[in-house]
C-alpha cells in the first residue's frame, strides 16, 4: 500500500475511534458514577477489537497479492 492509503485508513480509523470513545464517555457520564477500572477495561476491549479487525483486513489484503507460479497451475 502506498503512503496515501495508509494515512487515509489511519485517519478514518482514528476518527471512528474518537467518536466511539466520546460516545462511551457521554454515556458513562450521564449514568452517574462509574468505576474508572470498568471504563478503562471497556476502552481496552474496544481498542483490541479495532486492532484485530484492522490486522485481519490487512492480512487478507496481503494474501491476495501472492503471484501464482506457472508450475503450480499444472496438474
Image (tube, grey):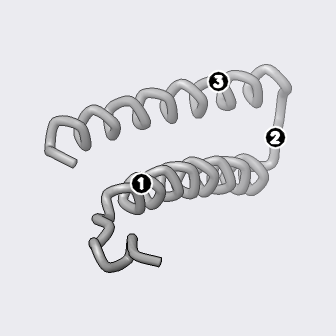
Label tally: 3
Towards the viewer: 48 or 54: 54
Q: Which mark is residue 38?
A: none
Residue 33 as seen in the image, left or right of residue 73: right
Give how far apart the Cα atoms at labels 1 and 2 are: 36 Å
Q: Which residue is mark 1?
A: 58
Instruction: Give residue 14's quadrant in the image.
Output: top left
Question: Residue at horizontal 25%, vertical 43%?
Answer: 6
Q: Tag 1: Cα neighbours inside 10 Å, few (<14), some, or many (≥20)?
A: few
Q: Residue furthest left?
A: 3
**Up-down relation of residue 30 to residue 50 (above or below):** above
Instruction: Give residue 59's quadrant in the image.
Output: bottom left
Give how far apart the Cα atoms at labels 3 and 2 are: 15 Å
Which callout, 3 or 1, points at the residue further toward the start of the chain?
Answer: 3
Q: Which residue is mark 3?
A: 23
Give how far apart the Cα atoms at labels 3 and 1 are: 27 Å
Question: Residue at horizontal 32%, vertical 32%?
Answer: 11
Residue 53, given in percent of the width and then of the height, sits at: 56, 50
Q: Which residue is mark 2?
A: 34
Q: Judging from the image, what secondary structure is the residue with disc 1 in?
A: helix
Closer to the camera: disc 3 or disc 2? Answer: 3
Q: Judging from the image, what secondary structure is the residue with disc 3 in?
A: helix
Which callout, 1 or 2, points at the residue further toward the start of the chain?
Answer: 2
Residue 19 as seen in the image, left or right of residue 41: left
Amino acid at each position: 500500500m502506498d503512503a496515501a492509503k495508509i494515512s487515509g485508513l489511519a485517519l478514518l480509523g482514528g476518527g471512528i475511534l474518537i467518536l466511539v470513545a466520546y460516545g462511551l464517555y457521554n454515556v458513562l457520564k450521564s449514568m452517574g458514577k462509574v468505576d474508572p477500572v470498568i471504563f478503562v477495561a471497556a476502552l481496552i476491549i474496544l481498542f483490541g477489537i479495532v486492532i484485530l479487525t484492522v490486522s485481519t483486513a490487512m492480512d487478507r489484503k496481503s494474501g491476495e497479492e501472492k503471484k501464482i507460479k506457472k508450475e503450480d497451475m499444472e496438474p
